[in-house]
Every structure is written in structure tokens, then in C-alpha cells.
Amino acid sequence: MSRIGKKPITLPAKVQVEIKGPDVTVKGPKGELRRSFHPDMQIAEENGQLVVTRPTDQRHHRALHGLTRALLSNMVTGVSQGFRKEMEIVGVGYSAQMDGNKLVLKLGFSHDVVIEPPENIKFSVEERGRFIIVEGIDKQTVGQVAADIRRWRPPEPYHGKGIRYRDEVVRRKAGKAGKAG
């Protein structure tokens, strides 16, 4: 039995779940998320908890069991607490600022990089443009938007300049050693 899949998901007080076959809608104080799951997985609400069960012990059902439970758990967490990714900009002249709800990055290019937030995503900038915070209710979208921002200037190993996640450790390399003589 899947260790992740058999764990029930406790629903917080303000979260409502609507199950219509494989389609699940989760509503909470932060918003609403919808998702369709594999029709073989049975999702039920029992005593304020969500329970996922699988029909057989076949390999693909075991894999779907844990996946379905994890996705449902992320939906419940997203609409109740939300998700956030914190990023740090390192480098002389590199910075970020807000222009309305758009994020404007100065990353050493001849132009500024303007990033518009997708639906349900919010940007904020802290400490004079050194930290970017990406917030939203969908874990996958928050992670993808943060990865797209990082892709503009990933941290380089010699000076450590670039955009990195706040908890990311960048391994530094030694530069040129000079001529041995």
C-alpha cells in the first residue's frame, strides 16, 4: 500500500470540497482550484477528511494513488495557506522593481525584462530590489513562474551573480590559476 496515498487529508475549517466523479473543486479563503483526476482513483470525503483509494494493486494504480493524494493535498494547502517562492538577486546593477502588478528586472541586458503575472499569481519585491517573492494558490504555477524568472539569469559558478532561490546553495569554482612558472 502506498504510504503517501493511504494518508487521509484533513480539511481546514474554511475549505469546501466538491467531488463529481473524477473532477474535484476545492474552495477556500484564498481562492478556488479545479482539477480532473484519473477515473480509476476513488476520492471521497469522510468526517472532514479526504480519502483516496485505488481499485487494484497494479503498478500504475499504485503510482496514481500517491500522485492523486499529493495533488489533492497541494490543492487544499493552496486554497487555505497559499504557496510562495522567495528568490534573491545577486550582482552589481542587478535589481527588481514593481510596475503596477508587473515585475521589472534589470539583469545587465540592454533592456529591462518585464514579466506579467499569470492568473492567481502575485509578485512582490523586498529590500530595495534584492528579493523577489512569487505567491499563489497553485503550487505548480508558482514553481514554474519562479523557474521562468530564474532562467533569465541563472547563478553562475565563478562570481555567484544571477537569480537564485533564497535557500539555494551555489557551488563556486576557482577562476584562472595563472601561469605556473
Image (cartoon, helix red, strand yellow):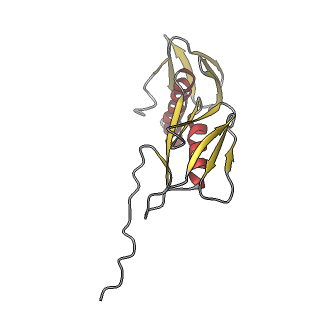
Question: Which residue is located at x 50 percent, y 21 percent?
Answer: 51
Q: Position of residue 83 (x, y in %)?
A: 53, 31
Q: Judge by depth and name the residue closer to the eye, 112 or 120.
A: 112
Q: Judge by depth and name the residue closer to the eye, 98 or 24.
A: 98
Q: Position of residue 119 (x, y in %)?
A: 69, 33
Residue 54 in view of the camera: no
Q: Judge by depth and name the residue closer to the eye, 78 or 48.
A: 78
Dividing the picture into quadrants, the one containing residue 35 is top right
Q: Position of residue 17 (x, y in %)?
A: 60, 17
Relative to 109, residue 62 above or below: above
Q: Which residue reaches farthest bottom?
A: 181
Question: Which residue is located at x 41 percent, y 55 percent?
Answer: 170
Query: Across the whole image, how many numbered discs are drawn on residues?
Result: 0
Residue 47 appears left or right of 117? left
Question: Which residue is located at x 29 percent, y 89 percent?
Answer: 181
Relative to 24, residue 181 above or below: below
Residue 177 appears left or right of 152? left
Relative to 110, residue 101 above or below: above
Relative to 28, residue 100 above or below: below
Residue 2 in view of the camera: yes
Dividing the picture into quadrants, the one containing residue 6 is top left
Residue 3 appears left or right of 24? left
Q: Which residue reaches farthest left?
A: 181
The quadrant of the image that shows the N terminus is: top left
Q: Judge by depth and name the residue closer to the eye, 19 or 1.
A: 19
Q: Position of residue 52 (x, y in %)?
A: 51, 25
